[in-house]
């Protein structure tokens, strides 16, 4: 698992914070991918459109994901290190 957290510990952490199955899928995908645009996340997860943006906004609001705009004005999402939440 990315960010040097064993997968079992990560799943326990996500359960502790009451992630839905789709939130966990998006968060883990971002850990694996690194910074990514929403359409790239959608391709990897098969979660699209409004549903994906609702999930990303929830993860942002709860401090699990960050969002930034690069020089070409494209937004990227990045999972924060799960070790911060232990």
Image (tube, rainbow, N blue to C red):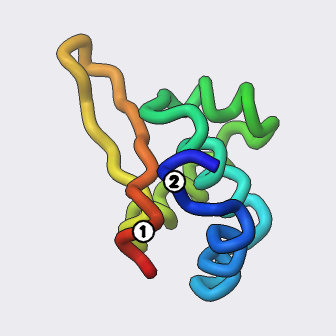
Q: Nearer the viewer, residue 71 or 14?
A: 14
Instruction: Tell me, yes or no, whether the two marked residues, 2 and 1, touch with CB atoms within 8 Å.
Output: yes
Q: Quadrant of the C terminus?
A: bottom left
Mark 2 to mark 1: distance in Å? 9 Å
Residue 81 in the image: state x and y as whole percent: 40, 58
Mark whose residue sits in front, 2 or 1: 2
Q: How many marks?
A: 2
Give left or right: position of 81 versus 6.
Answer: left
Find the residue positioned furthest to the bottom. 16
- The residue labelled by disc 1 is 83
Q: Secondary structure at mark 2?
A: helix
Looking at the image, residue 25 lies above or below residue 30: below
Looking at the image, residue 12 lies above or below residue 69: below
Q: Crowding at label 2, few (<14), some or many (≥20) Cα neighbours within 10 Å? A: few
Instruction: First in sequence, mark 2 or 1: give its number.
Output: 2
- The residue labelled by disc 2 is 4
Residue 35 in the image: state x and y as whole percent: 43, 33
Q: Secondary structure at mark 1?
A: helix
């Amino acid at each position: 698992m990315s960010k040097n957290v064993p997968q079992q510990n990560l799943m326990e952490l996500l359960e502790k914070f009451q992630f839905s199955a789709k939130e966990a899928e998006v968060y883990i995908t971002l850990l694996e991918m690194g910074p990514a645009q929403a359409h790239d996340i959608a391709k990897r997860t098969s979660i699209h459109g409004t549903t994906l943006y609702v999930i990303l906004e929830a993860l942002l609001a709860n401090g699990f994901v960050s969002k930034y705009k690069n020089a070409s004005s494209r937004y990227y999402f990045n999972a924060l290190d799960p070790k911060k939440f232990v």
